[in-house]
Image (cartoon, rainbow, N blue to C red):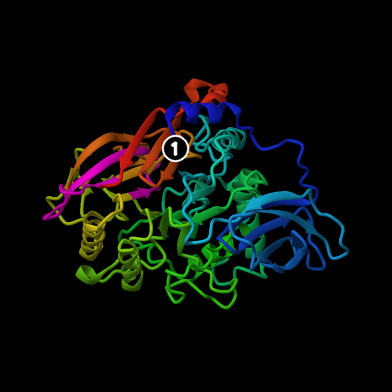
Amino acid sequence: MQRRQFLLASAVAAAPSSSWQPGKVRHLIPTASHDRILLKASFEAPLANAPVLRAGTRTFPGRMTDTRGEFWSFDATALAPGQPHNLQLFDAKKKPLCDPWELRTFPVPGARPERFRVLIHTCAGGDERIQPGHGPAYFLPLPTRHRLLDRALSFQPDAHIANGDHIYWDLRQTGAPPRYREDLIAATGRFERTAPVMGTANEDVLKRVCRQQILKLYETRFRGVPSFFLQDDHDYFENDDANATMVTYPPDHFMVQLGRGTRNLCYPEFLPDANRPLGLPGASAVDKPAGCGESYGTLRFGSLAEICLFDCRRYLSLAGPNAWVVPPETEQWLKARLQDRGMAHVAYLSSMPPVWSAGKWGDWYPDFLDAAGKLSLKAEKPFYQSGWTSQHDRLMQALSAQPSHIPLWISGDMHAHGEAQLLRTGSTDLRANPVNCFLSGALGTGDGWPSKGRRTRPYPSLHVEVDEKLPALEENGFLLVDFDPAATTVRSFRWTPEQGLDAIDRLQPYRTTVLKRRG
């Protein structure tokens, strides 16, 4: 789509309809493949009997995902591909629970659509009541985040990726905001680590946290857009820290149960894909919809575009030179997808960012922050695992060496916008086909930018050589990525509170990058 067409579309595209009535529904977040829709929903009050989802003339029973009947999952299968499906929720007595709405399945895998647009953002979570002293909110107010999301939706994306940090409620690490706001803890409750998460008082605490940071943010505005939620460190209720007191990752049992519980309640699992093994870690669990994954997913739009999504925290290992960020089976799947010449585009999207570092422990790289606040390699970073960087280098080399696709890796976590072409990683020269790397911009960050705590904004790691097209910029925003058969176009949107709230409603891309396929 040319720039003139893009601006025209943004001018005529409508924000989500205010006439749609949610009824008794508190939130709706669906995902889709070419023949299946998976929906997560919650209700204002518990339902004693299972509600049903009607898709066209067929109905699909709800599956309760909590222990009280407030949260339900709906799995609509064997649907027609590439078609709009009329959906509506009903209670057990066949009374409507909300207005009907429409959701389109994706094209069949062999189809050749002409365009595909995906909205990408990161770090949308945070309780706006958390404040550092008496200054501005650590996180943006929910109405401001609503406005940013509604502006993004006005460009009519075909899909939506929320890349990690949907929750900020770190439990044990020094510096976690709730530790210093006892009134907020009193309002939400405390977790008891020796009790199960579901079916105990822990379930009530988890729901209060999720209600404030996820349900109140998304509500029902994404009911017509298939959404893909990737988890990062804070979604397991800890920051990625390592010190003499504790090493937070890989997550312990209680952290995993909180992460699984959040997904179970709030947002869909990843639907199966024919080219993603059903036995990857975190997939095909007996308490999840058939064949679905929790940590590794596929967004496939016909034969035009495939985005491989991968969680970098749950299965991270601490094995020195043999350590990994994703298990070997996952790495094999990621590299194998690059060889599929039937796809016009194959891209990576991870929770942990490549290229940029702020010297913290949970990076791909060995950089640490020295006393002067500069990245350095002159000493060993405590608890760093060299195998992480080795795996990074293998993935980057595979991206650069692929036969026909644009080497593209989009990530989140860094609370920043950024763009760079990776020219070298370690001793591997990638100049013949540099890897294009993007940071997607942060949706929920208020005045709690990481540089205030880390003493530095993100910079390219000393392990790599890059052409930094856009130095890391700590501002709110999102990406719109358009795929067509010949190119990928990445449009970056940015906003700061100094611009005023009304500026959100007029946001246009401040940076546009067109990446063309070779040949």
Q: Position of residue 15 (x, y in %)?
A: 64, 34
Please give the range of residues in magenta.
409-436
Q: Pick whichever, 130 or 284, lies toward us.
A: 284
**Image-based side of 86 in relation to 135, left or right:** right
**Image-based side of 25 in relation to 37, left or right:** right
Q: Pick whichever, 436 or 257, lies toward us.
A: 436
Question: In the rendered view, would you say 373 is above or below 425?
Answer: above
Q: Residues within 10 Å of mark 1 (few under 14, many from 20)?
A: some
Q: Residue at x 76, y 41 (%)?
A: 20
Q: Pick whichever, 441 or 247, lies toward us.
A: 441
Q: Position of residue 294 (x, y in %)?
A: 50, 66
Number of marks in the rendered image: 1
SS category of the residue bearing label 1: loop
For the question of whether residue 420 can be seen, the reply is yes
The answer to which image quadrant residue 277 occupies is bottom left
Question: In the rendered view, would you say 408 is above or below 249?
Answer: above
Q: Quadrant of the N terminus?
A: top left
Q: Position of residue 434 (x, y in %)?
A: 21, 47
**Image-based side of 417 in relation to 148, left or right:** left
Give the labeled residue for mark 1.
Answer: 448
Q: Is residue 423 magenta?
A: yes
For the question of whether residue 237 can be seen, the reply is no
Q: Residue at x 34, y 37 (%)?
A: 514
Q: Is residue 518 magenta?
A: no
Q: Pick whichever, 145 or 192, lies toward us.
A: 145
Q: Residue at x 47, y 58 (%)?
A: 300
Question: In the rendered view, would you say 17 is above or below 125?
Answer: above
The answer to which image quadrant residue 316 occupies is bottom left
- The amino acid type of the residue labelled 1 equals Gly
